[in-house]
Image (cartoon, rainbow, N blue to C red):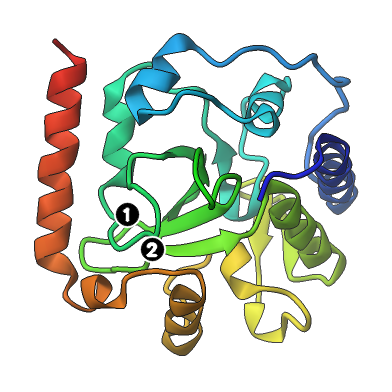
Amino acid sequence: MLDDLRVLRDAVRDYRLAATAAGLDWSDQGESPTGQPPEQVYRIFGVDHVAEQLTWLQSQRWPERRLLPNGGWLMSWPEGPDALDYLWLAIGTPFPWRHQLPLFHFEHAIFTFVLAGEHEGEIWRYEISPDAWDSVRAATSLATLFDQWTRGIAAGLIVYEGEYNKWLQIEDLGSAQGLDPLAFPVAPVEETLLRARQRECGVDMAIVEDGFPYNEELSDAIDAVKASLSR
């Protein structure tokens, strides 16, 4: 789902205010105008347009530090086809694996922005693990994701760890009353919740139940696309 741009702006602002109130060093640098995505983004991900919501977020002047829960950071626009390597676990998705841009990088997970089709604007997550077939929607939109994180800070589930890391740390999702655990970059995900959400958002369960050969197939597809883009 693509957010109304005003709603997204408000959600990101509220998250920054909550994060700084918790102790994170993130000064207000003002809103930057929405730029244009680099031309290579269209070629790398095989799409003919990029949503304004994503372009607005990438245009903001965020400090180059870990501003997201569990030390995550906003990934910049990709410079080349190697960005497709981040999608090597995207098996069983209800949209073409290539139609998503790696957006948020966490210690144990990658969150992507779906670029096209009925799922455009959704945020999907992939655990960074050699044998975890966990393609699943993390949030229906960017604003929804930031709102969950803001509420997590307010509930005391996300706290500032200032002694060593100096970033926001997720403490105990087990007490996340009214919050969506899958919106938070914690791995592994409780399996019953994971499988239920996968079915709900259209993941091909036959693929994730026998993920290894499909993962090998996807890796070959990624290599083939990268080779074609390098010619």
The one of 148 and 47 positioned closer to us in this rendering: 47
Q: Judge left or right: residue 89 versus residue 156.
A: left
Q: Quadrant of residue 145?
A: bottom right
The one of 21 and 138 positioned closer to us in this rendering: 138
The span from disc 1 to disc 2 (Cα, nearest Å) is: 6 Å
Give the x, y percent position of residue 150: 81, 57
> Which residue is drawn at the image coordinates 83% and 46% (left, top)?
11
The one of 128 and 10 positioned closer to us in this rendering: 10
> Which residue position holds label 1?
90
Against 80, is 210 above or below?
A: below
> Which residue position holds label 2?
135
Against 55, is 35 above or below?
A: above
Mark 2 residue type:
Ser
Mark 1 residue type:
Ala
Residue placed furthest toward the bottom? 192
Q: Judge left or right: residue 178 versus residue 93.
A: right
Against 143, is 172 above or below?
A: below
Residue 59 visible within the image:
yes
Q: Judge left or right: residue 65 versus residue 208.
A: right
Q: Are marks 1 and 2 in contact (CB under 8 Å)?
A: yes
Give the x, y percent position of residue 80: 32, 18
Give the x, y percent position of residue 118: 53, 51
Residue 105 visible within the image:
no
Q: Quadrant of residue 82?
A: top left
Q: Sequence order check: which comes first, mark 1 or mark 2?
A: 1
How would you rate the neighbour count of disc 2 (Cα within 10 Å): few for under 14, some for 14-19, many for 20 or more? Answer: many
Of the numbered discs in the image, which one, if any, rests on residue 121?
A: none
Give the x, y percent position of residue 202: 44, 69
Helix, strand or loop at label 1? It is loop
Helix, strand or loop at label 2? It is loop
Against 169, is 11 above or below?
A: above
> Which residue is drawn at the image coordinates 62% and 25% (left, top)?
64
